[in-house]
Amino acid sequence: MIRRFPCILRRLSVLVLLGAALPAGASGGPALADERPVAAVQAFAQTLSGKLRKQLMQPFKSDSRFGFDWVPGTRAGVSLGELTEAQRKSLRGVLRSVMSPAGVEAAEGIVVVERVLGEIEGNPRFRDPNRYWLTVYGDPANGKVWGLRFEGHHLSANFTLNGDTVLSATPSFFGSNPETVPSGPHKGLRPIAAKESRAWALYNSLTPEQRKRARRGGGLFGGFKTSSNTPTFDAGSPDGLPAAEMTAAQRKKLSALIDAYVSLASQDFAEHYRDTVLSREIGTVHFHWRGAEAPGDAFFYRLQSKRLMIEHDAHEGSVHVHSIWRDHILDFGGAAYR
């Protein structure tokens, strides 16, 4: 199995993913002027047969809308494996309408890494990069609030919209195994690298006393306070070092770490979230850390305020990583839409 690994990775060099090959380090590119969410979904739906269009469009009040997860399995909606190359290009336009170029690149990278994982484990049928689904909840054209999800193993990108306006980009889960592709044409690919590098930049800036403070509380090592398949969450009191006890330079690093999550959403939503949520919440965020003192071993961090929850678990020697961003008020568009 290991001997065949480089051969499999060579085949990745011709992989067409969502309509575009993913060179190492490439971005999704700037959004086109006509890539608005409603038009993008309508254009994609028009490429589908009646059967696939019915699979794509689910009722807004469907229970599956809140059943987000990040483990392998079958989802509602339309999978990559059911689409032609042209249809994948159209699906990519949908993602570009609600994600930033960095967000699209991260999602594409996770799908690429899924195939790598299949070869590492010797189980390519189980680790299938075609098993990622796009699902639309409600009718984007009826003037009411609607939802959108792109999901599969290690990925659950959830959006709630009113027309073309993104109301919420949470819950948001991005993970990767391996965290870094070890060889082949995509060697060095790290779909969620900023969520690790910026966390280490913040932790390394702390004094010994601040590190002790950051490590207080938290119960068992790792493990999310939040969970999948839940419309909202109650995570209790935050652990760790409060932003109020950080220097201005450290708070800047804290903001940069949070932005590694927020910036994966569309530019309009990310800017609005920074201005209306983070500007008020940043001073109350707590930074909790467990595990390694240097990169290479397992570690865990949590950023928590009254409404914000970000958790990152790097386990199996930090090779396998999970990251989730939730907002107690905005998840799935808020209480009015849950």
Image (cartoon, grey):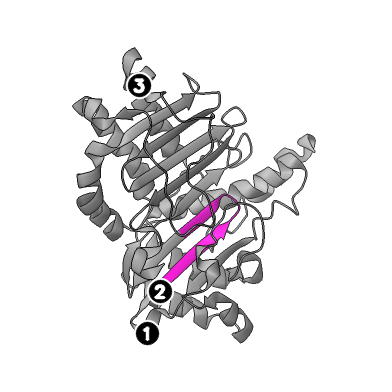
Q: Which residues are magenta?
A: 147-157
- From the image, tell me which residue sits under label 1: 142
Label 3 vs 1, first from the N-terminus: 1
Q: Quadrant of the N terminus?
A: top right
Q: Nearer the viewer, residue 48 or 5?
A: 48
Does the residue at mark 2 contact the one at mark 1 (Cβ under 8 Å)? yes
Task: Note whether 312 is above or below 308 in the view shown.
Answer: above
**Residue 35 visible, this orientation:** no
Q: Is residue 253 on the magenta stretch?
A: no
Which corner quadrant of the image does residue 96 belong to?
A: bottom left
Q: Measured from the top left, where is residue 199 in percent x and y?
A: 39, 31
- From the image, tell me which residue sits under label 3: 213
Query: Which mark's residue is nearer the viewer, 3 or 2?
Result: 3
Q: CA distance from mark 3 to mark 1?
A: 51 Å
Label 3 vs 2, first from the N-terminus: 2
Q: Amino acid at mark 1?
A: Asn
* Residue 146 tag number: 2
